Image: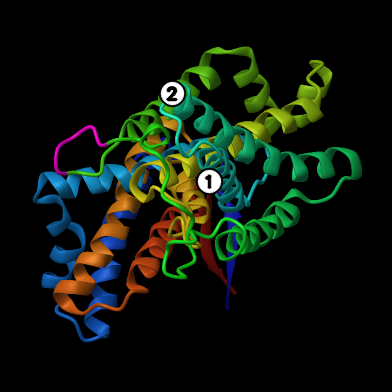
Amino acid sequence: MRLKVEPRSTGVPAMNALVPPLAVVATILASGVVFAVLGYPAGRTLFAFFVAPLVSLNGWAELALKAGPLAMIAVGLAAGFRAGIWNIGAEGQLIMGAVAAGGVALGFPDSQGFWVLPLVCLAGLAGGMAWGAVPALLRIRLGVNEILTSLMLTYVATLLLSYLVFGPWKDPDGYSLPQSRMFSDAATLTPILARTRLTSGTLVEFLVPVALWAVLRYALVGFKIRTAGLAPAAAGYAGFVQSRVVWTVFLTASGLAGLAGAFEVLGPIGQLIPQITPGYGFTAIIVAFLGRLHPLGIIPAALLVALSYIGGDTAQVSSGLPKGAAGVVQGLLLFFPLAADFLVRNRVRVVR
């Protein structure tokens, strides 16, 4: 006896809509089992993980603050994934956007001009795009796999950031800590809600998926991206140049990642430090697939994954849960939608 996987002759349309909520329920149940196996009260730990962070206004603000960059990065990656282009280096592009924005901000330490903040944000956008242009160029000119190049460049960006904050950009008055000087008020995003860290950058991050949804649905460039992923041969016959699609999705995704990095250092952090994010660039891949690669579906997916970050910290304090538990929950959030998608498209039967 053995198991045989067969594609279904007809799909299950109703299940396509049910997969995300079912995956969330399965993740919560599986998380409770994991917590119990680790020796923690499942009910109390699940409450601390998924409910306790949302009982205050500040908790909701922190949720939006963490979900914003995830949503903006994920929607750029999703556009590439739908076109069959696999940019895995959003973390490095985020870091380089932060470095570029931080470099410009440090270059105008005393300026109070209104133009400083837009210039710094544009620098973050350009920094991410420049980093993403490298794997795009290597794929187009040399046929190099963009998965490897974009991923490897992430480690280069991390080391460059460390070099700068430990070396030439280190704050001379920072008690030997690896950090840059604090940015000027003109180069930072101020909170828009009292007693929270929520900034206007977060609003932009939630508007970007809506704008990109409109582009993908109604603009010609969106049609080109969808066609390149679903029917590459048809795209060629229609006169769509593959290299242009590669450039479009890579520069869009890397620019958005770079802008997210700029918002991080210009908002909640206010300076350059070795650890800018808890891995938003990698976690955004989970968000993209949990949101079914749909720009509007990515927004609730980003909120859910952001809750796993905040809930992990809350459960760590209240229940003593290990720090890596949040990573386990995020992994389950990716595993269950992929497993459900597989079962929707295929059936498994026992053969003799």
Q: Nearer the viewer, residue 7 or 261?
A: 261
| Within-10-Å neighbours for mark 1: few <14, some 14–19, many 20+ | many
* Residue at image mark 1: 98
Dominant SS in magenta:
loop
Vertical comparison of 174 with 67: above or below: below
The outermost residue toward the right is 142
Q: Position of residue 230 (x, y in %)?
A: 66, 32
State the SS at label 2.
loop
Please identify the quarter of the rendering in which residue 221 is found: top right
* Residue at image mark 2: 113
Q: Tag 2: residue type?
A: Gly
Magenta highlight range: 191-195
State the SS at label 1.
helix
Residue 74 appears in the picture as rendered: no
Q: Nearer the viewer, residue 178 or 100?
A: 178
Residue 193 sits inside the magenta stretch? yes
Relative placement, left or right, of 214 versus 132 is: left
Q: Position of residue 71 (x, y in %)?
A: 42, 40
3D distance between C-alphas at marks 1 and 2 = 21 Å
Vertical comparison of 239 with 129: above or below: above
Please identify the quarter of the rendering in which residue 44 is found: bottom left
> Earlier along the polypeptide chain: callout 1 or callout 2?
1
Vertical comparison of 322 with 255: above or below: below
Q: Position of residue 149 (x, y in %)?
A: 75, 54
Please identify the quarter of the rendering in which residue 131 is found: top right
